[in-house]
Image (cartoon, rainbow, N blue to C red):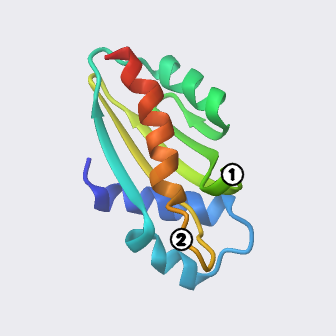
Amino acid sequence: MKKEQMDQLLVKAVKKYELGVTPKILEKVPQKSEFEELEIEDISFLIVRDNLIALGKILDENENKKMFTACINSGVANSNPCILVVLTAKNRVYIGAFAREGLINQHSAHKAIQKLSTQLKKYK
């Protein structure tokens, strides 16, 4: 999976789960999103699910596509909600994240990915 494909999934997730989203915000998703690909041997769908539950809230789960949409609070004092799309494959986990930032960029999307990837790297 490439970042461009993940950005398309993030746009759909933001449109569905964020309140008050505008076309202008959706246009910014590809520029403001973060993406990470982790290689973890024999990672399971359930392990990813359990770690997402521990960090935030799962908004949508599709076991057939092995995909989650979740919300994790991150940024300064964990006060900024961040939308994540997580795909699992046999030995890979793809994580995309987007968060709306205010006047001060808190790097919330990056921090949310770091939280999840730190948890998942324990299974390497």
Give the numbered dot on residue 93: none
Q: CA distance from mark 1 to mark 2?
A: 13 Å
- Where's residue 31, x and y in %? 38, 73
Q: Is residue 26 above or below residue 59?
A: below
Considering the numbered disc 2 on the image, is that residue within a helix, a strand or a loop? loop
Residue placed furthest toward the bottom: 24
Considering the numbered disc 1 on the image, is that residue within a helix, a strand or a loop? helix
Relative to 117, is 102 on the left or the right? right
Relative to 73, is 46 on the left or the right? left
Q: Name which quarter of the figure residue 72 lies in.
A: top right
Quarter of the image with the C terminus is top left
- Where's residue 5, x and y in %? 32, 57
Residue indicated by mark 2:
105
> Which numbered disc, 1 or 2, marks the residue that appears first in the sequence?
1
- Where's residue 56, x and y in %? 66, 37
Q: Nearer the viewer, residue 36 or 104?
A: 104
Q: Residues within 10 Å of mark 1 (few under 14, many from 20)?
A: few
- Where's residue 19, x and y in %? 74, 67
Give the numbered dot on residue 77: 1
Q: Residues within 10 Å of mark 2 (few under 14, many from 20)?
A: few
Q: Residue at x 29, y 41 (%)?
A: 37
Q: Residue at x 73, y 74 (%)?
A: 20
* Amino acid type for the residue under numbered disc 2: Asn
* Amino acid type for the residue under numbered disc 1: Ala
